[in-house]
C-alpha cells in the first residue's frame, strides 16, 4: 500500500477520532495533517507486525497528547461546568460550581478532565506530562476535598 492509498483510506477515520478528543475541527485537522506527515516520513519503518491502522492510530494518540501538552490546557470554570445542576451526578461524584471553586487550579483541572470530559487518569498524566501516581494523588485529594464540603 502506498502513501496515497493509506491517506485516502484512513484520513477521515483518524480525523474524527482526533476531533472527539480536541472538540475543535481546525485543531483536529492540523493534528491529523501532522499524523499523516509522520506516516509519510516513517512509512519505510512500518513493520507489518500489526495492522497499518493500529500503527497510524498510535501516532494519532501521540500527536493528540502532544497537542494538549503544547496547549498547556488551562481549564477554568467554563459555562458547561458552571451550568452543572447542584444535584447532578457526574461520574459518581457530586460536582457543583461552589465546590469546584474551592479546589486548587490543578485539582480542578484534573477533576474536570476526568469527571466531565471522561479522560482516564493515565491519559491525563500523559497530557500533563506528570507521573500517574502524582495525578492519582491529586485527583483523590480533590475528591476528598469535595466530599468534605
Image: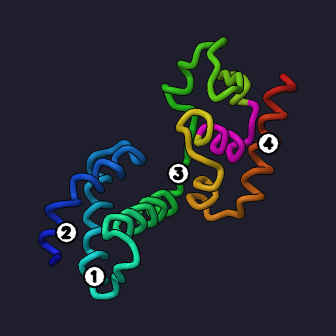
Residue located beneath label 2 in the image: 6
Residue located beneath label 4 in the image: 140
Q: Nearer the viewer, mark 4 or mark 1?
A: 1
Q: Dot 2 surroundings within 10 Å: few (below 14), some, or many (20 or more)?
A: some
Left or right placement of residue 117 versus residue 43 in this view = right
Q: Are marks 3 and 1 in contact (CB under 8 Å)?
A: no
Q: Earlier in the sequence, mark 4 or mark 1?
A: 1
Q: Quick check: 21 above or below 89? A: below
Q: Are marks 2 and 1 in contact (CB under 8 Å)?
A: yes
Q: Earlier in the sequence, mark 3 or mark 2?
A: 2
Q: Quick check: 115 above or below 55? A: above
Residue located beneath label 1 in the image: 43
Which quarter of the image is occupied by the N terminus? bottom left
Left or right placement of residue 69 versus residue 90 in this view = left
* Mark 2 element type: helix
Q: Are marks 3 and 2 in contact (CB under 8 Å)?
A: no
On whether residue 108 falls in the magenta region, the answer is yes
Q: Dot 4 surroundings within 10 Å: few (below 14), some, or many (20 or more)?
A: some
* Mark 3 element type: loop
Region of the chain picked out in magenta, as a range: 102-112
* CA–CA distance in space, label 4 to label 2: 43 Å
Residue 38: image quadrant is bottom left
Q: Earlier in the sequence, mark 3 or mark 1?
A: 1
Percent x, y of residue 138:
77, 48
Q: Dot 1 surroundings within 10 Å: few (below 14), some, or many (20 or more)?
A: some
* CA–CA distance in space, label 4 to label 1: 42 Å
Q: Residue at x 69, y 30 (%)?
A: 100
Q: Earlier in the sequence, mark 4 or mark 3?
A: 3
* Mark 1 element type: helix
Residue located beneath label 3 in the image: 73
Amino acid at each position: 500500500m502506498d502513501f496515497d492509498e493509506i491517506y485516502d483510506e484512513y484520513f477521515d477515520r483518524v480525523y474524527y477520532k482526533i476531533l472527539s478528543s480536541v472538540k475543535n475541527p481546525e485543531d483536529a485537522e492540523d493534528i491529523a495533517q501532522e499524523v499523516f506527515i509522520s506516516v509519510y516520513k516513517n512509512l519505510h519503518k512500518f513493520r507489518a507486525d500489526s495492522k497499518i491502522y493500529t500503527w497510524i492510530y498510535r501516532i494519532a494518540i501521540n500527536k493528540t497528547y502532544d497537542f494538549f501538552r503544547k496547549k498547556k490546557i488551562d481549564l477554568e470554570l467554563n459555562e458547561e461546568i458552571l451550568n452543572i445542576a447542584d444535584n447532578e451526578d457526574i461520574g459518581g461524584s457530586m460536582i457543583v460550581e461552589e465546590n469546584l471553586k474551592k479546589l486548587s487550579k490543578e485539582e480542578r483541572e484534573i477533576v474536570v478532565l476526568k469527571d466531565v470530559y471522561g479522560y482516564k487518569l493515565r491519559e491525563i498524566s500523559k497530557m500533563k506530562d506528570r507521573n500517574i501516581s502524582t495525578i492519582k494523588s491529586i485527583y483523590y485529594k480533590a475528591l476528598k476535598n469535595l466530599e468534605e464540603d
